[in-house]
């Protein structure tokens, strides 16, 4: 390969790398668009946030701009949203999915979601008692599995309501 061709290729490569770095820094500076909803309510619709912490069956983890693209299943627990202004909002989710895209956008789709401040700790404890009773009296694999899920969700609900 001639020296001129090598020089031209190196300049082209350097231009591409510079362009990619500029795009990445712009994307990081602009935050991370979050869409978070349940079938009944939209909490965020492509709103830039600083960070999102989610509970998943593969472990709880935090999401920042430029996180590796990921798909995870939510387990019962608290989703924490760190807004651009610095406030932190917390939501209890029963289950759902979280998707982190290559462009740093994040979608949290919950089966059920409630702001933590709206939880009633007495009602959560009552739900746990009922779920535990249902589990102890369940007969059959399906009934036991459903009761076990109810216990797990209720335990997370009690923990989130404190």
Image (cartoon, rainbow, N blue to C red):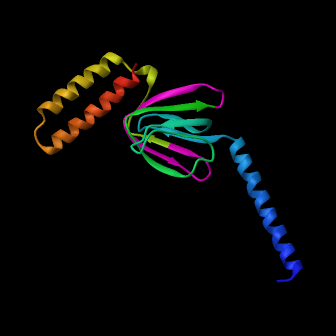
For the C terminus, the quadrant is top left
The single residue placed furthest to the right in the displayed view is 4
Task: Give the side of residue 70 with respect to residue 112, left or right.
Answer: right
The single residue placed furthest to the top in the displayed view is 122
Q: How many marks?
A: 0
**Against 161, is 106 above or below?**
below
Quarter of the image for residue 147 reads: top left
Q: Can residue 86 be found in the magenta stretch?
A: yes
Residue at left offset 60%, top offset 41%: 64
Q: Provide residue 77's location: percent of width, then percent of height.
A: 40, 32
Segment colored magenta: 84-107
Front residue of 91 and 151: 151
Task: Give the side of residue 62 with respect to residue 134, left or right.
Answer: right
Quarter of the image for residue 18 reads: bottom right
Residue at left offset 11%, top offset 31%: 137
Q: Provide residue 99's location: percent of width, then percent of height.
A: 50, 48
Q: Can residue 34 be found in the magenta stretch?
A: no
Task: Give the side of residue 63 with respect to residue 133, left or right.
Answer: right
Residue at left offset 77%, top offset 52%: 22
For the N terminus, the quadrant is bottom right
The single residue placed furthest to the bottom in the displayed view is 1
Q: Provide residue 23's location: percent of width, then percent of height.
A: 73, 52
Q: Provide residue 40's location: percent of width, then percent of height.
A: 42, 35
């Amino acid at each position: 390969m001639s020296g001129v061709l090598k020089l031209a290729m190196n300049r082209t490569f350097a231009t591409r790398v510079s362009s990619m770095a500029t795009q990445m820094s712009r994307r990081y500076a602009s935050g991370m668009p979050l869409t978070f909803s349940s079938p009944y309510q939209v909490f965020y619709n492509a709103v830039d946030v600083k960070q999102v912490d989610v509970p998943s069956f593969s472990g709880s983890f935090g999401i920042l701009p430029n996180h590796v693209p990921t798909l995870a299943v939510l387990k019962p627990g608290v989703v924490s949203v760190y807004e651009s202004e610095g406030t932190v909002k917390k939501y209890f989710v029963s289950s759902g999915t979280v998707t982190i895209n290559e462009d740093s956008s994040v979608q949290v789709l919950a089966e059920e979601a409630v702001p933590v401040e709206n939880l009633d700790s007495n009602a959560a404890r009552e739900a746990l008692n009922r779920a535990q009773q249902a589990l102890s009296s369940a007969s059959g694999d399906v009934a036991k599995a459903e009761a076990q899920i109810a216990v797990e969700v209720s335990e997370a609900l009690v923990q989130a309501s404190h």
